[in-house]
Amino acid sequence: MKSKKICKILGKIGKYAFLGFWAIIVLFPFYWMILSSLKGYSAYNSEYIPKFFTTNPTFENYSSAFTTVSLGRYFFNTIVFAVITTAVMLVVITLAAFAFARLEFKGKNIVFTLFLSLMMIPNELIIITNFVTITDLGLRNTFTGLVLPSITSIFYIYLLKENFEQIPDNLYKAAKVDGTSDFKYLLRVMIPICKPTMITITILKIIECWNSYVWPRLITDDSDYYLVSNGIQEIRENGFGRENIPAMMAAVVVISVPLIILFFVFRKQIMTGVQKSGTKG
């Protein structure tokens, strides 16, 4: 018994040591980013051997991030883009997932199979098609052009459909007997039950919008419509300069903070939604 207890304790020590080791590897880039942002330009460049701490931290780089370049405008553009895109997408995928999960119509399985097959198309081909379409519609350098290609997601439709199908059919039949419409059943029954998954999809979409780079960079060359991810490049070229690494790091920290806060606030809902989507029945 004593040897088993020792082996159990050693096993736990080994497990936490392993997890701690990988946690250090994952978190170290964030630590280095914050550390570099707290160093002055001259202090950073005078370090022939990088130091893992600083004795004279400064917040000057953070003020420069908002005064030297239009980081505040990039934040506003990204928030508008993320909120509008996520809101419209939730409406689209919820209605689509409900139709595939509960409604019966001819060719439903074929249509859904075709939807899933679209996931095999490389994103590069989709971007080219979207670019031509948006350009032909004259929507370049507009928020409409930024938002339209991102208002739906086949993967999120599939994820939500799987959650809707886990709801017992008896609830739907009972609701229909009571004269409840499909739309009212969706709002009052299905969405509340699948709330964790809806929250997970919302957060993942916001993160996707926040980190979006290729499409916004392609569809707009007007800095008035730059997002934070595209603004970093503009900051590097026309703001702080290529050599002012501390100021660049300060801008990256400022941009990263909202996503980190979002994750910590909704981490339980994210884990619940992921676990629920992976359980059938």
Image (cartoon, helix red, strand yellow):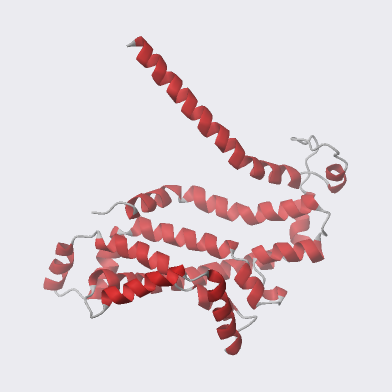
Depth check, front residue: 190 or 281: 281
Rendered image quadrant of residue 193: bottom left
Instruction: Give the side of residue 280 with respect to residue 214, left or right.
Output: left
Q: What quarter of the picture does the N terminus occupy?
A: top left
Which residue appears at 86% of the width and 39% of the height? Answer: 48
Rendered image quadrant of residue 50: top right
The image shows residue 108 at horizontal and vertical percentages of 27, 76
Instruction: Give the side of residue 149 with respect to residue 142, left or right.
Output: left
Rendered image quadrant of residue 173: bottom left
Which residue appears at 40% of the width and 18% of the height? Answer: 7
Q: Is residue 153 visible?
A: no
The image shows residue 251 at horizontal and vertical percentages of 71, 56
The image shows residue 113 at horizontal and vertical percentages of 33, 72
Q: Is residue 8 visible?
A: yes
Depth check, front residue: 122 or 192: 122
Q: What quarter of the picture does the C terminus occupy?
A: bottom left
Instruction: Give the side of residue 148 with respect to residue 178, left or right.
Output: right
Instruction: Give the side of residue 176 with respect to residue 40, left or right.
Output: left
Q: How many marks?
A: 0
Depth check, front residue: 8 or 139: 8
Which residue appears at 21% of the width and 76% of the height? Answer: 104
The image shows residue 25 at horizontal and vertical percentages of 61, 38
Outermost residue to the left: 177
Which residue appears at 55% of the width and 65% of the height? Answer: 209
Depth check, front residue: 34 or 111: 111
Q: Is residue 115 above or below residue 189?
A: below
Outermost residue to the top: 2
